[in-house]
Amino acid sequence: MKIVKVKLSEIYVPQALRVPVDAAKVEALALDIAENGLQNPILVRADKERFVLVSGLHRMEACRALGEASISANIVQPTKK
């Protein structure tokens, strides 16, 4: 998989992943990302005009809390039904 930078504003969070985020976890991740950078990119899949989050909601929110405009992501293929 190739790591790319994706604008946070271009990432759609599907209803299934819209769980309440753990504020303490986001804060801890934000501190770690500020010190060490994002070590584990989020996973997204390409949609027509945006990206859809597959995994990494807390990492995404931690980057947003740090004021980042983009995040490192691996683009995965959609699963076939």
Image: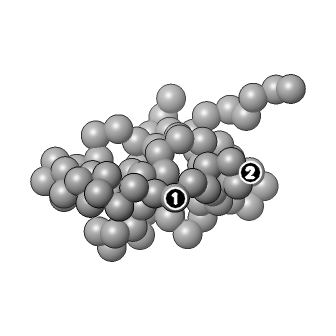
User: Residue 47's x, y, as percent?
Assistant: 74, 51
Question: Residue 20's mark?
Answer: 1
Give residue 47's mark.
Answer: 2
Q: Quadrant of residue 30?
A: bottom left
31 or 72: which is nearer to us? 31
Seen as rendered, the residue at the extreme bottom is: 67
CA gap between label 1 and label 2 equals 24 Å
> In this picture, is 45 found above or below 70?
above
Left or right: 70 in relation to 26: right
Mark 1, Cα crowd under 10 Å, few <14 / some 14-19 / many 20+, is: few
Q: How many marks?
A: 2
Colour treatment of the image:
one colour
- Which residue does the image show at 61% across and 34% down from the upper left? 76
Residue 66 in picture, x, y percent from top left: 29, 68
Q: Residue at x 35, y 61 (%)?
A: 23
Q: Is residue 30 above or below residue 9?
A: above
Secondary element at tag 1: loop
Question: Which residue is rendered at x = 19% and y = 57% of the image?
Answer: 31
Question: What amino acid is at disc 2?
Answer: Asp
Label 2 element class: loop
Tag 1: amino acid: Pro
Q: Is residue 40 visible?
A: yes
In x, y percent, where is residue 77?
A: 68, 32
Measured from the top left, where is residue 40 in percent x and y? 35, 38
First in sequence: mark 1 or mark 2? 1
Choose mark 1 or mark 2, whichever is in front: 1
Which residue ends up furthest to the right in the rendered image? 81
| Left or right of residue 81, residue 67 in this image | left
Q: Nearer the viewer, residue 62 or 10?
A: 62
Tell me if I can see residue 62 in this picture. no
Q: Kindly identify the residue that appears in the image at 64 percent across and 59 percent down.
A: 12
Callout 2: few (<14), some (14-19), or many (20+) C-alpha neighbours within 10 Å?
A: few
